[in-house]
Image (spheres, rainbow, N blue to C red):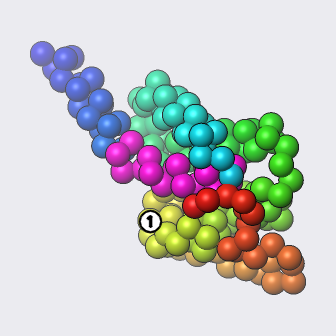
């Protein structure tokens, strides 16, 4: 009996995770890729990967695990799209700082929500935001213009 309950619990945990994060993953992917359909396909693949690796994700941190898969997948899709106007923040900043800036500054996520989505604690997110601001201080890539042509 306990064997039949474990998958149900894991399935419900995964389903709750998807319900909690899917919309934010979509917004992030759409902001970086500038293409809602492509973003949807990427997020669908990421969530399928997370589902297939759910036991591993639970041993790590599901948010951090899935965020890494999402970032890698979006970066790959972005390179394949070859549109240099997109994803300026990620060309100008280290990945974590760019992600923090995009989520908080461009997509308007509260620091706590952005940190949880990335699998960070809030002070770690603030460090990334400070790094982004410092690195962009004299630069040309503003927070709100990191992805021209993208709809958030």
- Classify 84 as above or below 100: above
Q: Residue at 68% across / 52% down in the picture? A: 34
Q: Position of residue 6 (x, y in %)?
A: 24, 25
Magenta includes 5? no
Q: Which residues are magenta?
A: 18-33
Position of the C terminus by quadrant: bottom right
The answer to which image quadrant residue 130 occupies is: bottom right
Magenta includes 19? yes
Question: Could you say whether the residue bearing mark 1 is in a helix, strand or loop?
Answer: helix
State whether the magenta stretch is mostly helix, strand or loop. Answer: helix
**What residue does disc 1 label?**
113
One can see residue 62 in this view: yes
- Classify 1 as above or below 54: above
**Number of on-image labels:** 1
Left or right: 76 as drawn, with respect to 20: right
Q: Residue at 83% across / 58% down in the picture? A: 85
Position of the N terminus by quadrant: top left
Q: Residue furthest left?
A: 1
- Graded by Cα atoms within 10 Å as few (under 14), some (14 to 19) or many (20 or more), the crowding at tag 1 reads some
The answer to which image quadrant residue 42 occupies is: top right
Q: Position of residue 8 (x, y in %)?
A: 23, 26
Left or right: 62 as drawn, with respect to 102: left
Is residue 151 or residue 58 the one in the foreground? Answer: 151
Q: Position of residue 95 (x, y in %)?
A: 72, 57
The answer to which image quadrant residue 51 occupies is: top left
Q: Residue at 69% across / 66% down in the picture? A: 97
Q: Residue at 76% across / 57% down in the picture? A: 87
One can see residue 71 in this view: no
Is residue 61 or residue 20 the one in the foreground? Answer: 20
């Amino acid at each position: 009996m306990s064997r039949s309950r474990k998958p149900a619990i894991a399935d419900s945990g995964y389903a709750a995770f998807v319900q909690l994060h899917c919309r934010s993953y979509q917004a992030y992917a759409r902001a970086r890729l500038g293409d809602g359909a492509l973003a949807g396909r990427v997020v669908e693949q990421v969530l399928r990967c997370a589902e297939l690796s759910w036991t591993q994700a639970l041993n790590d941190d599901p948010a951090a695990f899935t965020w890494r898969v999402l970032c890698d997948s979006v970066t790959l899709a972005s390179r394949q799209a070859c549109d240099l106007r997109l994803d300026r923040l990620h060309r100008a900043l280290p990945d974590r700082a760019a992600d923090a800036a995009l989520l908080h500054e461009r997509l308007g996520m509260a620091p706590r929500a952005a940190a949880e989505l990335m699998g960070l604690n809030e002070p770690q997110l603030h460090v990334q935001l400070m790094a982004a601001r410092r690195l962009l201080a004299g630069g040309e890539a503003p927070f709100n213009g990191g992805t021209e042509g993208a709809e958030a």
